[in-house]
Image: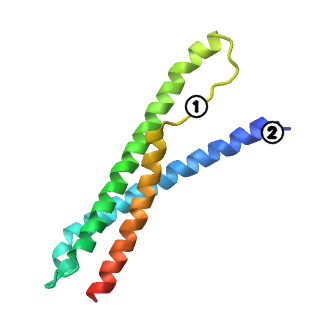
Amino acid sequence: MNTIKEVEMKYQERGYEAKYEFSDRVVTLAAGLLAISVSMRGWVVGHSPDYLWILKLAWVCMALSSLTGIIWRYSKIQMNLGVSQAIKPAVEAGATSIEVIPSGLHRFCFQTSIYALIVGIIAFTVYALTIT
């Protein structure tokens, strides 16, 4: 039978895996939307660029979402490397556990990536509705 601590660690690990996969999808979606809309900008903008600022807002949000998502993933790698380097000295000192606290940059990048994607999608939608 599993102890409560083992069950907690199992579900915490599942949460981290889901967060990582979600971040991967956010970066992929943001980069894809940005690439498609920029490459088709002549068709998207059309002959009347009245609301072009909304489209530019969407592009900035998609670029920001992709960039902060990539930075988040890189900071996760750095955090894991730091933990792996801290394990040996901790075990030698007799520690039975290590607490890992993500940096403020780590949390900021994850949240910014998601919120920028949401604002970007809303901006694309508003732009599409205003030009039709």
Q: From the image, state whether disc 1 or disc 2 is nearer to you.
A: 1
The extreme left residue here reads: 47
Q: Residue at x 43, y 66 (%)?
A: 118
Secondary element under disc 2, as helix, strand or loop, is helix
Answer with the quarter of the image where residue 71 lies. top left
Tell me if residue 2 comes above or below residue 60 in the rendering. Answer: above
Q: Amino acid at mark 1?
A: Val
Q: Amino acid at mark 2?
A: Ile
Q: Residue 119, position in %: x, y?
A: 39, 67
Q: Residue at x 48, y 36 (%)?
A: 103
Tell me if residue 122 comes above or below residue 76 in the rendering. Answer: below
Marks 1/2 in contact by CB < 8 Å: the verdict is: no
Q: Residue at x 45, y 58 (%)?
A: 114
Q: Residue 47, position in %: x, y?
A: 13, 85
Q: Which residue is mark 2?
A: 4
Q: Which residue is mark 1?
A: 100
Upstream in the sequence, badge 1 or badge 2? Answer: 2
